[in-house]
Image (cartoon, rainbow, N blue to C red):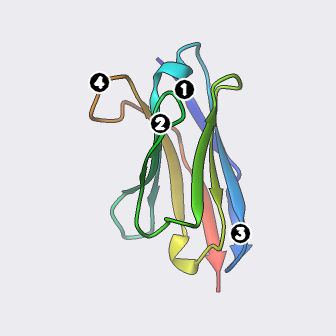
């Protein structure tokens, strides 16, 4: 089992950048595929980016391609999301999530961190 804690959210002007971090507890972080999700006010949760256990990026939502970069440091048990050229529509609560090998659904979720982009 793994526990996830996000950090790095905040208020930023359009065009700015933020880097989110997700610290994982436990010794099995390196065996989990990880992802970043977001949920805006009144919107459904959407997957933003995904990365395999070995650092191979598996997914970016079309809305963030070329602007966001997902990465992980298994030695530090940490997942990252570098967000550049932020837009007001990126405003949401961002969650990191993890799933074991072979799993389709994400089993473990953080509590979320708020990102607000002002125009």
Q: How many marks?
A: 4
The secondary structure type at the circle numbered 2 is strand
In the rendered structure, are the residues bearing label 2 and label 4 in contact, judged by CB atoms less than 8 Å apart?
A: no
Q: Are marks 3 and 1 in contact (CB under 8 Å)?
A: no
**Residue, disc 2:** 34
Q: Nearer the viewer, mark 3 or mark 2?
A: 2
Q: Secondary structure at mark 3?
A: strand
The Cα–Cα distance between marks 2 and 4, rounded to whole angstroms, is 12 Å
Marks 4 and 1 close (CB-CB < 8 Å) = no
- The crowding category of the residue bearing disc 2, from other C-alpha atoms within 10 Å (few below 14, some 14 to 19, many at least 20), is many
Q: CA distance from mark 4 to mark 1?
A: 19 Å
Alpha carbons under labels 3 and 1: distance apart: 25 Å
Residue 11 appears left or right of 46: right
Look at mark 3 in the image and give the residue it sits on: 11
Vertical position of residue 66 compared to residue 59: above or below: below
Tag 1 or tag 2, which sits nearer the N-term? 1
| Front in this rendered view, residue 94 or 84 | 84
> Residue 3, position in %: x, y?
54, 26
Q: Residue at x 55, y 70 (%)?
A: 91
Are there few (<14), some (14-19), or many (20+) residues within 10 Å of tag 3? few
Secondary structure state at the residue bearing disc 1? loop
Q: Which residue is mark 1?
A: 3
Task: Name the residue furthest top.
Answer: 27
Q: Residue at x 64, y 86 (%)?
A: 119
Q: Position of residue 56 (x, y in %)?
A: 49, 38
């Amino acid at each position: 089992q793994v526990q996830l804690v996000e950090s790095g959210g905040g208020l930023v002007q359009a065009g700015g950048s933020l880097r989110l971090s997700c610290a994982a507890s436990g010794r099995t972080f390196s065996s989990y595929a990880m992802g970043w999700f977001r949920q805006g006010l009144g919107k459904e949760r959407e997957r933003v980016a995904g990365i395999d256990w070995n650092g191979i990026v598996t997914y970016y939502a079309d809305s963030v391609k070329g602007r966001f970069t997902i990465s992980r440091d298994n030695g530090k048990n940490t997942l990252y999301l570098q967000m550049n050229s932020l837009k007001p529509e990126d405003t949401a609560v961002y969650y990191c999530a993890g799933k074991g090998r072979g799993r389709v659904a994400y089993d473990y979720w953080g509590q979320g961190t708020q990102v607000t982009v002002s125009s």
